Image (tube, helix red, strand yellow):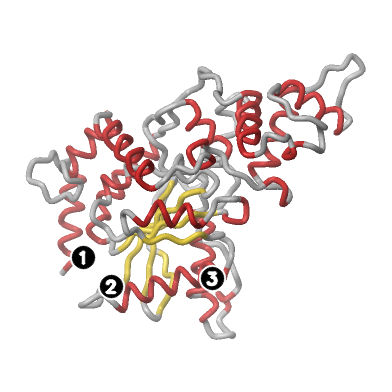
Amino acid sequence: MSIFPDFNIPLSNFKGHHQKALTKFGHLAPQIDMVLEVRDSRAPIATTNVLFDRVLANKPKLILYSKKDLSILKKEMLDRWHKATNEQYLFVDCRNKRDANQIIDMLRIKYEAMHPKPPLGLRLMIIGMPNVGKSSLVNTLRTVGYTSKLPDMVSSKKVKKVARTGGQPGVTRATSEIIRLSEDPDILVYDTPGVFLPTVKDTQTMLALGLVGCVHTSFIDPVIQADYLLFLLNLQDPSGAKYSQYLDHPTNNINELLYHIAKSRGTLKPNGTYDEIGIANHWILLWKQAKGPQYKGLFEIQTIVETNGKELQQLFLQERERLKASTIGEKITDKLGEDGTGRSKHRKRSAKDREMDNKNVLFKL
C-alpha cells in the first residue's frame, strides 16, 4: 500500500500558551542575538514551525536536529537541504555532553565574531515544536558550559535541572527567565514553551507529530496512529523485518499485527479478543521512545522518499503562505508588521507592546 487513508482527525492543537509564547517571542526579539531552533530528526519537516520565521525574522539561527540516537536520518540529506540556504545546523542528542560542548563552541565563535561585543552577553532563545527536546538541551548546555566550570567547593555544582522536562508535550508552558549557560564568554538563554502550528496542512503531518510526541497520546486514536506507523515501516522496509518478532510475513493489516503482538505478550483472551487500544499504545510507545536499537526510524513520508533541498524549500514557502493568511498570521502582522521585524510603522500596538518597546530601548542603552 503506497497511499494512506485520509482519516478524520483534528488538524489543530494550538493552545492559549502557544499564542502567549509567540507574543513573548516578538516582545523579546530586539534583545535576542541568536536563535537555536530544535527539530526532531525523526520528522524534521513536520517539526519545522514556519511561524518562527515571522516573529524572529532576520535573527541568526542555528538549527539543531535532536534525538539523533532515535533516528536514521542521513546527514547527507541534511547537507542537501541546507546547502541552498546556507543555514547552519547540527545533528545532536540533547542529553549528550559532547554534542552540548559542540554547540557551546559554536556559540563562542559567534560571540568572538561580534563587534562590538554585546555588553550584556550573548543572548539566545531556544525554540521549537512541543516535546522536541528544548528543555533537556538547556539543562545539558548549562551543565557543560557553566556548572562544570564552578569551583569544586561550590555547593550548586551538583547537577540539577534548570528547566523542567517530561515525556509529554506542554511541560514548559511559559518562557523562562534568562538562564546563564557560560561565564566566559557570557552566554545566556531563554527556554521557551513548544509552539504548535494553528493548523497543520494534512492528516499525515498530524500523525507524524503524534509519533514523535508533539501532541499528547490521547489526542489521536491509537489504532489509527499504529496503522500509520505500520504504513511508514512498510515504506522503509517492505519485507516486514521491522515487526518480524510478531509476524513471519509483511502485512498492511494493522488488526492482524495487533493480534499477533497481543498473542506474543500473552494478553489474548480465551475468545481471541484483546485490548486493542492498549496494544496499539504499547507498540507506538516502543517506537516513540525507541525501546531498543531496532526501533529507530523516520516518521514522515517526505523524508523517507528523500525530498531534495529545492523541494523542501518549496514546501516551507507554501507553508509560510498558508499560515500568513491565517488568523495567527494576521495577528503577527498587526504586531510586527509585514516583514516580521517590528520596525514597520504600519502595525497595531497594544499597551503591553508599547511597554515592551520602552523596555527594549532601555535594554539597548
**Within 10 Å of the Cα at label 1, are there few (<14), some (14-19), or many (20+) other Cα atoms?**
few
Q: Which residue is mark 2?
A: 120
Callout 1 amino acid? Phe
Question: At numbered mark 2, what does the secondary structure look like: helix, strand or loop?
Answer: loop
Question: At numbered mark 1, what does the secondary structure look like: helix, strand or loop?
Answer: helix
Q: CA distance from mark 3 to mark 1?
A: 28 Å
Question: Given contact means CB atoms under 8 Å apart, are the residues at marks 3 and 1 in contact?
Answer: no
Question: Given contact means CB atoms under 8 Å apart, are the residues at marks 2 and 1 in contact?
Answer: yes
Callout 2 amino acid? Leu
Q: Residue furthest right?
A: 270
Q: Earlier in the sequence, mark 3 or mark 1?
A: 3
Q: Which residue is mark 3?
A: 143
Callout 3 amino acid? Thr
Residue 33: quarter of image: bottom left
Is 78 above or below relative to 320? below
Q: Which residue is mark 1?
A: 363
Question: At numbered mark 3, what does the secondary structure look like: helix, strand or loop?
Answer: helix
Q: Earlier in the sequence, mark 2 or mark 1?
A: 2
